[in-house]
Amino acid sequence: MGEMTEQAPSAGWLEGREHVLPVRIYYEDTDFTGVVYHANYLRYFERGRSDFLRVAGVRHADLLELPDPAAFTVVRMTVDFRRPARIDDALHVRTVYNRVKGPRLFIRQRIVHAEETIAEAEVEAACIGLNGRPRKPPPGLVAALEPLFADAP
């Protein structure tokens, strides 16, 4: 038998300015009827936003190690549920960072199954300091995301 090498979990990929993250539905994701429990969609959206940043070269741990540490908090989220996902479904979380304005980042997300959108979210996140107060995102973050903003000129 060959030697096993450790492989990092997939952080997804970019298709143009849109990040795509594959997600498989497991038994633990479902409720007693066999469909995904509604709160789990928020977890999938969070993974999509975080892995978008990772693919763009921005790591949460690095933001916390800055001289003026930064983090994110969701301040507004609107979710439309179109149809349920079920056990064993293979989904794609599709994430687009639209723009940054002051401390706020505006993000659009979709969860897709077999080319059909089953849930959509409009997200407003804020960059905050460790004191919980809003702050402008670090310049390195903006520089990494700017070429990927959907609302870019």
Image: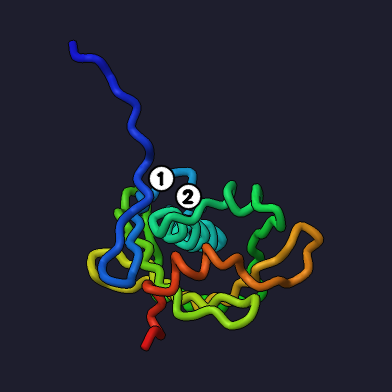
Query: What residue sits right under mark 2 in the picture?
Result: 29
- For the point 56% across and 67% down, which residue is it? 139
User: Split into 4 quadrants, where in the image is the C terminus?
Assistant: bottom left
Q: Could you say whether the residue bearing mark 2 is in a helix, strand or loop?
A: helix
Q: From what the image shows, is residue 105 above or below residue 14?
A: below
In the rendered image, residue 103, in percent from the top left (x then y), is placed at 65, 76
* Mark 1 and mark 2: Cα distance apart in space: 5 Å
In the rendered image, residue 136, in percent from the top left (x then y), is placed at 65, 73
Which class describes the residues within 10 Å of circle 1: few (<14), some (14-19), or many (20+)? some
Residue 86: quarter of image: bottom left
- For the point 44% across and 69% down, which residue is it? 145
Q: Nearer the viewer, residue 127 or 107?
A: 127
- For the point 41% across and 77% down, which residue is it? 149
> What amino acid is found at the position of numbered circle 1 in the picture?
Tyr
Mark 1–mark 2 CB contact (< 8 Å): yes
Q: Which mark is residue 5?
A: none
> What amino acid is found at the position of numbered circle 2 in the picture?
Asp
Query: What residue sits right under mark 1 in the picture?
Result: 26
86 to the left or right of 66: left
